[in-house]
Amino acid sequence: MSALRRSVISFGIIGVLATATHVAVFAALVEMGKVAPVVASVPAFLAALLLSYFANHYWTFGARGAHATHMPRYTAVSILGLGLNTAITYGVVDVLGWWYGVALAAVVLIVPAVTFLLNRNWTYAKVEA
């Protein structure tokens, strides 16, 4: 298996695990902690971000150390992904007036591809050839 294919697969697996982490933390805080959903979304996002950062750092991109460089870049890419998610959803649902499922499909296809490429070519540019 090529290094690129392996990286794409591991990035996808970690994305699923990070999503599950986000859902679990969010639901636990809302249901058991009685935390407001908007407030609960912040620690849920941060937990998913930390899991995905460290898993992708070591497994997907094979990085060692350099957290002072990689973590801020990875965080910036993740926030950009959140903004892209929001922009796509707004454009498809609010501007075009289409069903939200179309927006969700576009988000699922576009955001992971964009964030993978940005992380591969910017966050970890010197790690993976």
Image (spheres, rainbow, N blue to C red):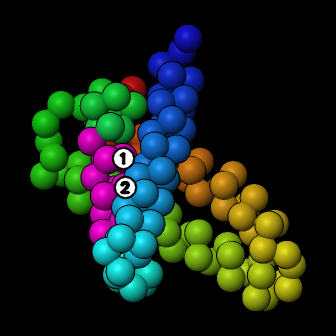
Report the magenta residues as a range. 41-54
In the image, residue 102 sits, relative to residue 61, either above or below, namely: below
- Across and down, in percent, residue 58 comes to 28, 31
Question: Few, some or many C-alpha atoms within 10 Å of disc 1 (few <14, some 14-19, many ≥20)?
Answer: many
Q: Which mark is residue 48?
A: 2
Q: Residue at x 39, y 26 (%)?
A: 129
CA distance separating discs 1 and 2: 6 Å
User: Callout 2, which amino acid?
Assistant: Ala
- Across and down, in percent, residue 98 comes to 86, 78
Name the secondary structure under disc 2: helix
Q: Nearer the viewer, residue 32 or 76?
A: 32
- Across and down, in percent, residue 46 comes to 30, 63
Residue on which the image places disc 1: 52
Give the tally of numbered discs.
2
Residue 35's image quarter? Answer: bottom left
Q: Nearer the viewer, residue 30 or 100?
A: 30
- Labels 1 and 2 touching (C-beta < 8 A): yes
Left or right for 11, reference 90: left
Residue 12's image quarter? Answer: top right
User: Callout 1, which amino acid?
Assistant: Ser
Q: Which mark is residue 102?
A: none
Q: Residue at x 78, y 74 (%)?
A: 100
- Across and down, in percent, residue 34 comes to 35, 80
